[in-house]
Image (cartoon, coloured by chain):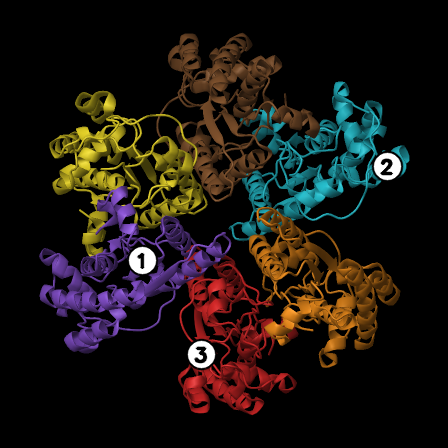
Chain colours: A cyan, B brown, C yellow, D purple, E orange, F red
Amino acid sequence: MRLHLMTWPQVEAYLAHSTAIILPIGSTEQHGPTGLIGTDAMCAEAVADQVAKALGVVVAPTLAIGMAQHHMAFPGTMTLKPSTLLALVEDCLLSLVRHGFDRVLMINGHGGNVATINAAFAQTQMELDRLSPRPALRTRLVNWWETPEVMAASVRMFGDAVGSHATPPEVALTWALHPDLADPHPLVPAVAPTGAFFGAGDFRNSFPDGRIGSNPSLASPAAGEELLKIAADEMTRLASDFFA
Amino acid sequence: MRLHLMTWPQVEAYLAHSTAIILPIGSTEQHGPTGLIGTDAMCAEAVADQVAKALGVVVAPTLAIGMAQHHMAFPGTMTLKPSTLLALVEDCLLSLVRHGFDRVLMINGHGGNVATINAAFAQTQMELDRLSPRPALRTRLVNWWETPEVMAASVRMFGDAVGSHATPPEVALTWALHPDLADPHPLVPAVAPTGAFFGAGDFRNSFPDGRIGSNPSLASPAAGEELLKIAADEMTRLASDFFA
Amino acid sequence: MRLHLMTWPQVEAYLAHSTAIILPIGSTEQHGPTGLIGTDAMCAEAVADQVAKALGVVVAPTLAIGMAQHHMAFPGTMTLKPSTLLALVEDCLLSLVRHGFDRVLMINGHGGNVATINAAFAQTQMELDRLSPRPALRTRLVNWWETPEVMAASVRMFGDAVGSHATPPEVALTWALHPDLADPHPLVPAVAPTGAFFGAGDFRNSFPDGRIGSNPSLASPAAGEELLKIAADEMTRLASDFFA
Amino acid sequence: MRLHLMTWPQVEAYLAHSTAIILPIGSTEQHGPTGLIGTDAMCAEAVADQVAKALGVVVAPTLAIGMAQHHMAFPGTMTLKPSTLLALVEDCLLSLVRHGFDRVLMINGHGGNVATINAAFAQTQMELDRLSPRPALRTRLVNWWETPEVMAASVRMFGDAVGSHATPPEVALTWALHPDLADPHPLVPAVAPTGAFFGAGDFRNSFPDGRIGSNPSLASPAAGEELLKIAADEMTRLASDFFA
Amino acid sequence: MRLHLMTWPQVEAYLAHSTAIILPIGSTEQHGPTGLIGTDAMCAEAVADQVAKALGVVVAPTLAIGMAQHHMAFPGTMTLKPSTLLALVEDCLLSLVRHGFDRVLMINGHGGNVATINAAFAQTQMELDRLSPRPALRTRLVNWWETPEVMAASVRMFGDAVGSHATPPEVALTWALHPDLADPHPLVPAVAPTGAFFGAGDFRNSFPDGRIGSNPSLASPAAGEELLKIAADEMTRLASDFFA
Amino acid sequence: MRLHLMTWPQVEAYLAHSTAIILPIGSTEQHGPTGLIGTDAMCAEAVADQVAKALGVVVAPTLAIGMAQHHMAFPGTMTLKPSTLLALVEDCLLSLVRHGFDRVLMINGHGGNVATINAAFAQTQMELDRLSPRPALRTRLVNWWETPEVMAASVRMFGDAVGSHATPPEVALTWALHPDLADPHPLVPAVAPTGAFFGAGDFRNSFPDGRIGSNPSLASPAAGEELLKIAADEMTRLASDFFA
């Protein structure tokens, strides 16, 4: 159930029996020469939709733009300042808690968001501590690609070529959603380099096509479908525990 | 062309011949007993997609959450603080201008966003004035439902029952997108009351089912399709002028 | 009644029978080669004083500095960041509401302020929603030069030469207040060019003497007196309705 | 010369031979049972006008609202948050320095403003340190009532009854400007109590009529005229040194 | 070398051959009935001092107050808002990079700080991206108690009773620094409960003496000395790699 | 009693009979060719420790980094933005008042901090005014080197060579704490120049070795010990009055 496709009386009825909601978050950033700019948001949203279907839980609109400063040397990337993302997540949580949603699961598609989301969780709890009576709120952040079964499947499918940016698992998942956009042509080098980076210019110098340690040419719509199923099942179990 | 469905080399190629982009913005807020919570975002995005198709222009991800404080007494509504929305729009514009996008058309679905978006335009221009060399940036905000032909068609179709919130035009447009969600059952009163309001509690007291001056039961998927076509044609002309 | 010229027991007595207050706002910015830098503040304040006299209402100190970023290439202009103006207006409103003023009419002299003031209204209502008990507050913003009768009179007096910046109506009004500063010498071109602009440098390039579409040489103290009377009468009616 | 009463070409001409400007700042706050709410702003502005006349220096618009939180239990008082005043002063200074004003004298009418203004000076210098080339800017803050000759005259005129809020010197100065508002009727007690206070409620409990340690009944328009002359002469010398 | 105990010419000389610096950060928060409120800062500082001695690297002043909101129901705890800590760390990094320090290792003593510090790293890199020329800066955050050898030693020494707050390793380390403050008396229950918590009140309800899953009675000065040595050696190797 | 060396039950017991606390604040900035970068923090902390010992009062962790922007041209200096320091001090005060500490004495080691600390006091009181019930809080700021007896002793010891930065009193006090770091070699010129400065670059141009008007070569550990005793005795009396 997408919150966007409900009416307010339907939300009111839902809240009478459940106070759980999923808030997906992604990023709008380059994903290598063949990956889609919306990869992170599309993956988080796809997993969230499956969990919602399995558990009958509401899904809030996906926050499609996150922290992508170090990708800014690649056209099409959009980024928020950490202070903006912090305020954005806090405002969302304060809105939800006012209606009585007290379990918010954020399914995240981008590692660069983690720190700021956790800071927003803390700031929101601090804000709630100031209200009387204090509304209860439990939040949890899960990176869809880092749960144990998804990681195991990723390694099983792609071995050393998973890498850490524009990875075959995330690229495959978006190709499962949009098979017409699949572009598995070989890249040079097949597996991108790895290493540290500091700042946007430094990133592009070190990783000229945007990938880090990955070979997304190994991705396919079929692999994406399989991964989405694994991720959805595992995340459903996690969500079910959290919402209990 | 959705930015989310492009790769960065495709954006780079696009920027070689066009620096135009559309940034839709909506809201996540109650739209009366039968209107969808995502109405404003869905309308803005639908019009933007039509313009993009007509002009071959890129569309950035829709900002789905806006300024909806006075709807907060209805469950499901989410709102940003003005200072958050201001920072969010500024960060988006500063991201785009860095890549060379210098014409940004914001197609807006919610009247409550207008003031803050314009403040964000001013703050962004001020920020750009501090850079050397100063990047050029032209921004424009258009409310899809307020262009002359859309307004004329709305009155022609729904007469006095257009109202100002949960209006038949916007509700019809979302039902054109999701005919299965159309719910034209008669409401009581048929046309909702009008009047001023100050704050969320006052709003719900004055407008108990969330509508202001409107009768969305007059909406239909067919009317929505017609309105979307009118809006898309008119907005395409406006966009074409702006991007020229 | 200027708030500045009252004592606190006088304000306390006033609040026992009226909770209305006017808060004028202007700008400190170039107004063409012959218009005064304080034009916007002086006009708003003059109209506010007339309304106050007619209705026996209190007038708070004029906020003389507003959003004037695109005039910054002309010496003497001062500007706030939108985030500063937002905080300034919010602080003023929160101060007034604490004493029981619950109807605040902002009479505005500068179009560039509108967006940010409206954002401040929204942010203030959001802030009040968090207090218990929630103080009531109604705010309204009126641009003195845009009310129907003032606009009609402006066109009747100056025809096509009203323009949109350093206009004969506003210049005339300040010359009515300071006849010794009237400077109606002919300008070249008589009517300034019009067009869009983005950023301060672009503005001065397009409008080298600061005017947009106007011919303030048509202004005169007599015309200003007439306009002030029209504006004062019309604004008094608007204010009377709002304060009722 | 009031900046508000100049045109931009006049400011441009002025800047060709002087880069000095005065920025008065006051407060909008209770000044005891007989003092005007605008006392602090009126005093600062009156002294600034005299200095401007003597030295031929430009005066920017008075910032009429300052830090008055501990007076908020008295109706009519308006206050900014320190963070707002900090941003307001910084924006003013950054505006002025852009035009080439590099000596800004702030003549202050309210002790509660001092800390935040000085913080704003530091933050502005920090901001300028980031620009290249770094604009030069010298700022000075002077409290008009604390210069040696004004203090000596105050004690000579009013002895122990000067006190620290709603003082006879400041009240007298405003009565010199508005003799019709002079209200020297005896107060009870003649001299108000003194002491520390913390927060607005505590202030009103300790000082029920708003005065601290003062007897403004000793004030008179004539005394105000004398003090204004002393203050103007002394401040002119200080300003002349600073602007040299 | 403590930065606080150096002169500026000594820092200048140091920068001629090394651009590395350590910035320790802790927290000021309850650590159970027998642990010190300054535990996190003391541990981070102690490890930093050992690394500094081993490598001849400068140590900046310890940031002693961090994110401790969920401990606020225990007296003595002090906490920053995430937005404050973000600004604090950013200001520190921007100060250091201006002098040419381009490798900053933050040794952290408190898990609650991690998210906000990482957000500050991102915000600082974003800020640096706006400067020209862009200063290089590499930052790394290491939690002293989570490095592999320290974790292994902790489990070896304390088994299941390590827990996650007021742990025997951190308590032991502070007792090694202050043997006179060691207080190993048995607690009831010996091992504290574990579980999730949301907000300060909830935390104290769930963990009435402040510990989570730990038995700090197992700590001793001797164990602390041993752990400090292990941590110092391991961190020295990590730091040496990072600074290379 | 250092807060850092207490357990929370000890703080709870302390609060049962005293609500007083000392919060020292310094700066991390150059102190001339022979003075330590941590001079301001070390002095404030040393005086605070003596007062704490005399009165049995708790001392919170020293805020070691303050407002040092104009020293930023000297390596090793670290500075906060005023807005950061304001938030930092406010967060500290709000933390302490939550536990019932209602008398907070800030012992300050750096003149540049004064304005922002006072702004933070005002902002904190404003924040507390919004809570219900309003917590009481009294704050006081004392500069250790500006109390009458310390100033008299400084002049007696060092005459005209006290100056205003890197002064012999503060340098002597740190040498009393670290006699091994005393470096009284003659400087050229013996007494540093004085004058105004604006911005960091201007400061270093005017004061090339960092001193202003001082001759720290006159300092000695013995003089520092004497001054610390005088400062501690005088501050103890001031603190005793404030805490009463």
Which mark lies nearer to you, 3 or 2? 3
Q: Chain of mark 2?
A: A
Residue E9 marker: none
Residue F213 marker: 3
Task: Please identify the quadrant where the C terminus of chain A is shown.
Answer: top right
Give the residue at x 44% y 17%. B188
Residue D73 marker: 1
* Residue C238 image point, x, y percent: 23, 31
Between F65 and A60, the residue placed more toward the observer is F65
Q: Secondary structure at mark 1?
A: loop
Q: Secondary structure at mark 3?
A: loop
Give the residue at x 77% y 24%. A175
Q: What is the quadrant of residue D82 in the picture?
A: bottom left
Amino acid, disc 2: Ala
Q: CA distance from mark 2 to mark 1?
A: 68 Å
Residue B151, above or below D182: above
Q: Secondary structure at mark 2?
A: helix
Asked if marks 2 and 1 touch (Cβ < 8 Å), the reply is no
Give the residue at x 22% y 69%. D234
Q: CA distance from mark 3 to mark 2?
A: 65 Å
